[in-house]
Every structure is written in C-alpha cells, then in structure tokens.
Image: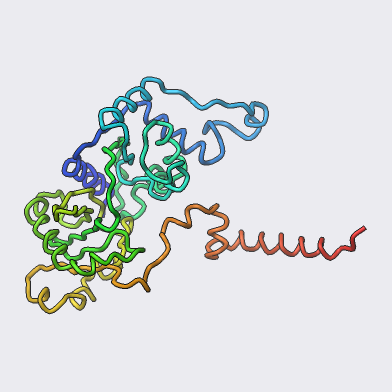
Amino acid sequence: MSSGRAWRLCRSAFNLSVGRSYFINSKSWVIILWWFLCSRSGKVGCDSDDSDLITHPSHQAPEFPEFAAKVQEAISSLGGSVFPKLNWSAPRDAYWIAMNSSLKCKTLSDIFLLFKSSDFITRDLTQPFIHCTDDSPDPSLDYELVLRKWCELIPGAEFRCFVKENKLIGISQRDYTQYYDHISKQHEEICRSIQEFFKRNIQYKFLDEDFVFDVYRDSRGRIWLIDFNPFGEVTDSLLFTWEELISGKNLKGDQSEGAATEQDYPVFRCTNSKVTVQPSPYLSYRLPKDFVDLSTGEDVHKLIDFLKLVRSSVKISDLPSL
C-alpha cells in the first residue's frame, strides 16, 4: 500500500465511522504531539542538550489553556467520558497505567497519560507509513485528536472483519485470548448477521477494496460499526495470519459444509475451547522495554551487558565478608 493511499483510507474511514465523535485539529495539538515525543525520549525540549537539563533541572510542562478548554468542552458534549485515539491508533497498550485500568477518559490529563505511555501512539507519530512499499514521499499529515463517546462494550461481542477485493473473506473474535460459550454456539448466526450488515452498509462504499473493519453485536443481534483499519501487517490479524489472508490459502478449509456451498461466505474463527485461552497480548507493554528485549533476545547488546553485570555481581559475592 502506498503512503498516500494509506492516508486517504484513514480519512475515508473517519467519514464512515464517525458516530458520536469529536475531532480536534489545531496548532496547539501539533505542539503537544511534538512535546510527547520529546518527553518520551527523556528531554523536555527537543533542542535541549544534556548540560541544559543539568543546569536547569526544574522544567515545567507547557500549558495550552485554549486547547484544554476545547477538549474539556468536547468531553462534556459527549457525556463526560470519552475514548481517545489519533488518526489511526488508540493507546490500547497503555490501559494499565490509568487509575481505572481502562481507556475511559474524563479529563485532558487522562488523555495525556495514555498517549505518553503508548507505543502505538508513538508509532503513529514517528513511523505512520512503516509498512508502505512505494517510493513516493510521505504526504503531509494533519494529526487529529479523535474523541468518541464512551460506551461499555462486552469484549465477547466484538469482531474483526477482513475484506479483500470488496469481499468479506474472514471474521475473527476480537478478544481471542478468552473463551466465550455464546460465540461457539451462535457463530453461524453471528457470521450471517455481520455478512448482511457488510453488504447493506459497507460493500462498494469504501475508498479501497482491501480493508479491515471492527463491529459490535449487541444483545438484540444488531451490528454496530466501530472502526476501520488498513489491510496489512500494521493491523492485528488476530486468529488469522496475514499470509493466509493475502494469499487466500487455508481459508476455505475452515468453512463448514453448509457455509462452503454459499458463495462469498466468510471464514469465521473463534476461541472454541478453554484450553486455548491465552494471556493478553498487551501484557508485555507493562514491562520496561529492556526487560522485553532481554526475554526475546531481540537486542544482543543488552544481553551482553546483562551477562557482564551478572558476572561482576558473582565476583563481588565471592569476596570474603569483613
């Protein structure tokens, strides 16, 4: 996917999934995003050097009263609680740092805390087109703070849908780390209702023919559109792999006999046993990155430094006590 097309898809997704949302785009927001990156790197100002931090240790965070008032007004208009995100991602990996262990925000400070702690948000700011393959220059971006009215959703009722060439080819349980008995029992009905919703409201109306969308199925069986995502590795494929989604291999083998006879019937995957329950994929984000790199072996230099530290500590412990 080209970088320009990825940006246009992002804007088209907003137009279709806006719902009860509030978009904020201002010069103050750009300055705040820049400050996020600087503070995550350990410096308050990007033009500050180490000596400046030593001689002036008491830096104060910048204030944006007009922007803060605008955000608070938006939060109030949406019922007092919102779900925040940027143009592409939400800070799902940072929910653990909030006092309520949730993405539910009531103030601008709540939003700042989540955004500053999120690797997903940092990726959107620094490498938004990392998986794009074209050689054209990246388009200029107008970052927007998107606030959505907070709704208490049941994780077992969320589903991710994969569309290729304007055909719904796969549906995955969103919270695949848990087993939900009702999904296993009602998977054909769920799949059929999502397929009908797609044909009636989305098919051939989106800017691109390859994309991903998330939906919610309530207790009455009604389908609600939540969000859109790019069709590619930047989006979590959940119970599928991107290799099989792109190639189409191993998908038809998952269909039941009844589904196989229906044309364009999507493959539905869910966690169908308590034995296959997995830990949350966001648990690793609670640990310092150095620990994660050590455990996975991704950074050889950190491993070498760790072994040197262990070796030196062993030598010190071998010394006789006075």
Q: Quadrant of residue 42?
A: top right
Q: Is residue 40 left or right of residue 78?
A: right
The residue under the point 19% across, 54% down is 217
Q: Is residue 246 visible?
A: no
The number of numbered badges drawn on the structure is 0
Residue at the extreme right:
322
Q: Position of residue 21 (x, y in %)?
A: 23, 36
Q: Is residue 10 left or right of residue 46?
A: left
Is residue 315 depicted above or below 32 in this figure? below
The residue under the point 46% across, 41% down is 99
Q: Position of residue 149 (x, y in %)?
A: 26, 37
Q: How is the image coloured?
A: rainbow
Is residue 13 depicted above or below 262 in this figure? above
Q: Is residue 89 left or right of residue 99?
A: left
The residue under the point 31% across, 52% down is 135
Residue at the extreme top:
66
